[in-house]
Amino acid sequence: MTAASPTPRLPLKQVLICGALVVTLSMGIRHGFGLWLQPITMERGWTRETFAFAMALQNLTWGVAGLFAGMLADRLGAYRVIVGCALMYALGLVLMALASTPLLFAGSAGMLIGIAQAGTTYAVIYGVLGRNVDASRRAWAMGVAAAAGSFGQFLMVPVENTLINGSSGLGIPGLGWQGALFVLAAMALVIVPLASGLRERWLESGVARPQQTIAAALREAFTYPSFQLLMAGYFVCGFQVVFIGVHMPSYLKDKGMTPDVATTALALIGLFNVLGTYFAGTLGPRVARKHILATIYISRAVAIVAFLTVPLSPLTVYVFSAVMGLLWLSTVPPTNAVVAQIFGVQYLSMLGGFVFLSHQIGSFLGVWLGGRLYDATGSYDVVWWLAVALGVFAALINLPVREQPIARPASAQGASA
């Protein structure tokens, strides 16, 4: 096969099903980590900042490791990356349950699970989708994968709450927070057989290599203003969603709400995000994606302001969760689709990894500042209002993004198509 020959593609249904299930498990497991904040800190005698720092480190590690996971997936195929990281995910969950010091907890829940998530979530999966789905359906396929991650949250948060606390209505005894983590470790191993459906043998064999190098692709991306704007917007996305996902259960408990309200709130975010991410993906071919992104970010700011100003009750919590769910990961399909549209799909996992690193730096700050400022002030108010201001900022900076394919010499264009 020559470099100019068309490369074989995996069946669309196979890629969508396996990719969606991998994201469902990986994202579903980690979306419920906020449920562990209070039981772990209370039993271990740690501050909330200790737990929050580990979760912040997890997000930052996820972002940094995503760069290398993306490079490896683009050069060697996603299969090996996904399998290796799935094994690390299971090990990290086991060690998270056994960690008896803040340092060990940060190493397992923070660094090890962060590396594992880098190879089992969007950047790597979207690279496979980009190479195997026609450009006309790419944003839709990315929406399906993102919706799967949201369904994982909807599905897994109640499951994780039941694993920890049990269910009197169903007569299911709780396993406690440690036993629940052991069960999740076994569930993470299911990712290994699913990865076989994403195995691109032609890529692993080293044939049909395009001409653009990694260094050239990075220079091209980082000197292109629209790429920088997308990274800045994604920083805000990470700050907002991870702060809310980790700290909202404790915020609601501080306000006198029962744990069931927090569990329902997180589940509603996941349920409505299935709709929001899928809808964002289907809008891509018809509406400028920069307008989709600007609308999402300004809507988040409005929703948070409304949540903070109306009287707090279970109903207002559920309405806020539903609205935020529609906006939660709906930034993912348009952002990655713009990257693919501008630069092509050859290095989509790698470039998506750099954009995602910005997201995870925002996640680090959102979750860590939530714990740090709570311990300093006894309130989450400062971080809530910071999330509002950042939402307005992200809406404005997405408007100048140029979505057209980047101009290249003819030889480079053919190589990256």
Image: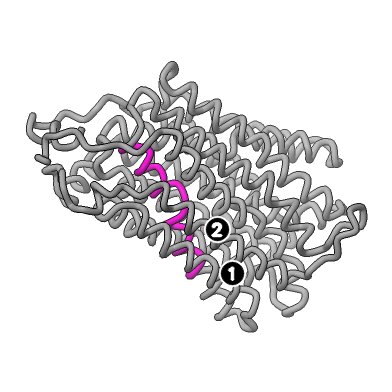
Question: Disc 1 designates what residue?
Answer: 93
Please name which of the two marks, 1 or 2, marks the residue nearer to the observer: 2
**Is residue 210 magenta-colored?**
no
What residue is rendered at 84% in x and 36% in y?
Answer: 315
Label 1 packing within 10 angstroms: few (<14), some (14-19), many (20+): many
Image position, residue 356 (x, y; %): 41, 49
Q: Nearer the viewer, residue 393 or 284?
A: 284
Give the magenta part as a residue range.
111-131
Question: For the image shown, how many numbered marks are present on the structure?
Answer: 2
Within the image, what quadrant is residue 322 found in? top right
220 w.r.t. 257: above or below: above
Within the image, what quadrant is residue 312 found in? top right
Image position, residue 311 (x, y; %): 84, 38
What residue is rendered at 24% in x and 41% in y?
Answer: 346
Label 1 SS: helix
Residue 393 appears in the picture as rendered: no
Label 2 SS: loop
Q: Which amino acid type is shown beneath numbered disc 1?
A: Leu
What residue is rendered at 38% in x and 38% in y?
Answer: 129
**Is residue 123 magenta-colored?**
yes
Label 2 packing within 10 angstroms: few (<14), some (14-19), many (20+): some
Magenta stretch, overall SS: helix
Residue 85 appears in the picture as rendered: yes
* Quarter of the figure with the C terminus: top left
Give the side of residue 250 with respect to residue 328, left or right: right
Question: Disc 2 designates what residue?
Answer: 190
Image position, residue 362 (x, y; %): 49, 52
Q: Which amino acid type is shown beneath numbered disc 2?
A: Val
Give the side of residue 20 with respect to residue 244, left or right: left
Give the side of residue 167 with respect to residue 199, left or right: right
